[in-house]
Image (cartoon, coloured by chain):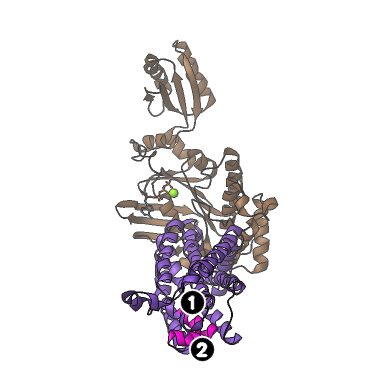
Amino acid sequence: MALIIEARGLTKRFGKTQALDGLDLTAESGQVVALLGPNGAGKTTFIRMVATLLRPDGGDLRVGGYDVRRQAPAVRRTIGLAGQFAAIEPAMTGRENLEMVARLFGQNRKNARSNASSVLEMLGLADAAGRLVRTYSGGMRRKLDLGASLVGAPKLLLLDEPTTGLDPRSRIELWDAIRTLVGQGTDVLLTTQYLDEADNLASHVVIIDHGRVVAAGTPAELKRRVGGKVIEVHVRTDDDVARVAQVLRRFDHGEVRIDQATRQVSVSVEGGGPVLMNALRAVEEAGLEVEDVALRQPKLDEVFLTLTGQPSADAALETTAS
Amino acid sequence: MAVATMPITKTTSIGVSTLQIARRAVLRYLRTPQLIVLGTIQGAMFLLIFRYVFGGAIAISGGIPYVDFLVPGFITTGVLFSGMGAATGAAEDLEQGFVDRLRSLPVPRVCFLTGRALADTAWNTWGLIVTAAIGFAVGFRLHDSVVNALAAFGLCVIFGFAFEWLFIMLGLLAGTPQAAQGMALLVFPFTFISSAYIPVSSMPGWLQAFASRQPITYMVDSVRALTQGQAAETLIGHSAGYLVVRALLWALGFVVVFGPLAALRYRRS
Ligand SMILES: Nc1ncnc2c1ncn2[C@@H]1O[C@H](COP(=O)(O)OP(=O)(O)OP(=O)(O)O)[C@@H](O)[C@H]1O
Ligand SMILES: [Mg+2]
């Protein structure tokens, strides 16, 4: 199969920050690749390089077989970019925005118009097409931004955190739109901070931190390594924390994590509902009282903990970083 | 979805790209009515203040009424004020991701600049028409041929175009609209230290030395000479032709210096 992205030993430094530190990544045509990583991992930096907005300091990067340094115009014809922040014109209508991008992509007036129409239709924006983008909701803007990235009919779509800041419904609508595109044969490279998003959309997940690949594989492979889900148990008294941990250790796939301050015990498990039931039964049999219990997807920092054996160095800074 | 694809190596033409980018910038201006209304009111207000508040205290030798002295200066420096829109506009394009979008498209690099310059020139020209109309309304009259007046108008468009390169560069340098506005405001004092609103001869000698040689003065005086004829040429001490040549050389200088700087800055951004 043809390689749509081929990155070898990519490096990029901004002042003192090594944003990319020898990143290797290959993606085959026909795949949706999710780039997963915490704040500052280098996701945007990599996307911007693929989009020819940033030049690598070192290493090689080919997109659709074209070298980003020497064949930038051909790369730009291969890709469509929806950046981390929606870059559409509020003082223009949805249709005007898409037609402009299509024209800038080199299409004649007639093709631009019909392509804009079909994209608006596909994204469910046909009714709002004649309204100024100023009046759009956040979710509609994101969708239109996605539309702008695909109105040129690119081979490879680059989506930088496409659903960040969206409500759950808009998020799912956007996922559907992306899936439709993939069904039509568009390749997608997207970045996300959410494991479930990668799980939902991608056939290949690359986890990066500090500008390096930490782990890569299909969502199933990674989940097998991480453990599928997390059981989180919240108890009433301080003393119970240790006891519940003792009980849950039996179901543990990775390691039992204890947070004494919030009286919370969490454990990675394989499988879903039945495991949760068994775990609850065991807790009950031990005569322990539970305040609250949840079965959820592992959070990104838990994935890191499991895959690398150490917390992401940014986890502690996440609240201060943007 | 039936989407037509393009040959892979082709870059979109400079003409189409420039027009599309210019159209967007013009729509941004047009669809922000506050900008148009406020800009017009501000211009009118300042013209009225100069004309009626300061005007009485400023006597122009050679029998030229102050309103005829002032309006050419006001119209000419007007391009600097509407030109500030180019600085904030360029900064917004950077900040809001339009530049990124453009650079990810197969569009020639130079088109961001040509598109912006075209749109900002159109915007400037509109501003010139409005200011001139207000000028006539408060008593400004031509004392030379209509052809020369039209030439003066054309010169103002050229001056506006020339200053835009400075403003676009400042906008790209500033990065945020607020900073861009702050930087653009730095040109404000230069309009006062020129012949725009008062005769340079009324300034102290050391200031006169600068004021009489700086580009804004040549530009204002060329417009003054073309609209007021003989009386203005006598007042200034130079013929219209002499002034026009110098003003145009300055304009050319701005384009030659700040055009490439803006392009360089765009490349780096
Ligand atoms: N233009 C820049 N100048 C200086 N530092 C930068 C620049 N761009 C990125 N960085 C730094 O490079 C590192 C990687 O940034 P990048 O934007 O690629 O992260 P990210 O994975 O996209 O993060 P987020 O999830 O917050 O979007 C960060 O430490 C960031 O501060
Ligand atoms: Mg990012």
Q: Residues within 10 Å of mark 1 (few under 14, many from 20)?
A: many
Q: Residue at x 66, y 65 (%)?
A: A111
Image quarter of residue A48: bottom left
Tell me, what hue is chain B?
A: purple
x%, y% of residue A241?
39, 18
Ligand 1 is within 8 Å of the C-beta of the residue at disc 1: no
Magenta run includes residue B47: no
Residue B162 vs residue A201, the one in the foreground: B162
Q: Give the range drawn in magenta.
A: B219-237
Circle number at residue B159: 1
Circle 1/circle 2 CB separation < 8 Å = no
x%, y% of residue A265?
41, 23
Q: Which residue is drawn at 60% across and 46% down?
A: A137
Q: Mark 2 lies on which chain?
A: B
Circle number at residue B230: 2
x%, y% of residue B187?
41, 67
Q: Which amino acid does label 1 sit on?
A: Phe
Which quadrant would the C terminus of chain A be assigned to in this image? Answer: top left
Q: Residues within 10 Å of mark 2 (few under 14, many from 20)?
A: some
Tell me, what hue is chain A?
A: brown
Q: Main secondary structure of the magenta part?
A: helix
Q: Is the residue A19 above or below the residue B251 in the image?
A: above
Residue A134 vs residue A55, the one in the foreground: A134
Q: Which residue is drawn at 63% across and 62% down?
A: A99
Image quarter of residue B143: bottom right
Residue B261 vs residue A104, the one in the foreground: B261
Q: What element carries label 1?
A: helix
Q: Which amino acid does label 2 sit on?
A: Gln
Quick one: label 1 or label 2, which is nearer the N terminus? 1
Circle number at residue B51: none
Identity of the residue furthest to the left in this view: A16
